[in-house]
Amino acid sequence: MTKISNWDITVPYQWTPGPVLGTFLGGLREKTITGVKCNSCGKVYVPPQDLCRDCLEDMQVENFVEVKPEGTVEGFVKIRQNFFGERPSKEYLSERISPADIDQHPLLWFPEVPYVVAMIKLDEADTCMLHLVKGADMDNLKMGSRVRAAWKEETIGHIMDIDSFKITE
Amino acid sequence: MFEPASRVMHTWYVPYKWSFGQRATEFLELMKKEQKIFFGRCTSCKKVMIPTAICGKCFAPLEDELVPVKDEGVLECFTVVYLPFPTQPAAPPYAYGYIRLDGTSSIMPHIIEEVDYDDLRVGMRVKAVWREELEGDIYDIKYFKPID
C-alpha cells in the first residue's frame, strides 16, 4: 500500500466588479436590490449587466432603479452533493487565507446539503437572478412560488448579503 | 445611486489526494521506524539518491533495498523567505535550502533553522533535527541546523 496524502490548492483572489455590477453590490450593502434599465428598450436587468443583451446598448449607472425584493420562482434545483468533496471548516480555511478575510469567505456561506438554488424573477425585473431558497416550508416550493429576500445582519457588498429568499405564499 | 463596491473576494479551493508511490512510501515508513534517512542506489551507476522509481541519469531501476544514509551533509544553496504564499512549509521568515547528504548524489530540500540567516553560507555543514514523535512524513525531520 502506498501512502496517500490529502492536499489542496487554495488560491485567494479579488476581482473588481466595475461601475455597473459594483453599484448593484453597493446597493446590497445598503440592503437594497437594484436593477439597471436599458436606455433603448427599457428592459430592467437584475442583476445588472454592462450591455443590454437585446440592443447591445451600454448600460448607464444613471439608469439604476430600485426594485422590490419580492418575486417569483421560475426554476429551481435541489443540491444534494457538496461541490468541494468536503466543505472546508473555518479552522481549516483560516490556516490558508488571511484571518481578516475569513468572514468574507464565500465557501463558508454555502449551506449544508441539501439546499435549493433557484432562478428568481423579481416583480419589477425582466430577468432572473440566481439565489438560494431556504425555509421550513421547502416541500411547498414549486414553479411560481412567491419569495422574498431575507438579508444578512451584516452586509459587505456581496451577492450573499442576501442570505436567501424565503417562500411567502 | 450607491457607492459601488470596489472588490469581490473569492478563493479557489481544490482539494485532492496524492499518492506517494512505492519508493517514497518506503522512504517515509523506514524513516519513521528507524529515525534514519533511507536513499536508493542505482543498479547501474551505483550512485545513492532520493528514492524514486529509476535513476534520473541512467534510467536504470534503483536497488530493491533502500540504504541508510547519514543525516548530515552540506548546504548546496539556500534562500530566506520573508513573504507569505500558499503551500508554504513554515511561517515566514524561514530559510530553505538544498542539502547534499554525505555520500549521496541528489539534493534534499528542507528548512534550515537554529542559525542567524546572515551566517548562512553555501558549503556549510548541516545536520537533521528530528521530531520527538515520528509520524512518517517529511517533517519527521523538523529542520536542518548548522554544525561545527
Image: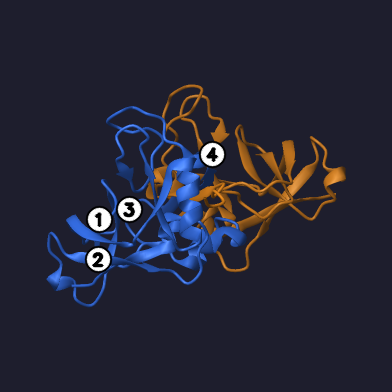
Chain colours: A blue, B orange
What chain letter is assigned to the residue under label 2?
Answer: A
Three-letter amino acid code of the residue under disc 4: Ile
Q: Are marks 2 and 3 on the same chain?
A: yes
Camera-side residue of B22 and A82:
A82
Q: Secondary structure at mark 3?
A: loop
Is B87 displayed left or right of A33 in the figure? right
Identify the mark nearer the N-term, 2 or 3.
Answer: 3
Q: Is residue B81 visible?
A: yes
- Find residue B48 and report its horizontal and vertical position in percent: 56, 35
User: Is mark 4 in CB contact (under 8 Å) with mark 1?
Assistant: no
Which residue position is annotated with label 1? A120
Three-letter amino acid code of the residue under disc 1: Ile
Residue at (83, 38) in percent of width and height: B121
Which residue position is annotated with label 3? A1
Alpha carbon separation for disc pair 2 and 3? 53 Å
Q: Are marks 3 and 4 on the same chain?
A: no
Is A24 displayed left or right of A122 in the figure? right
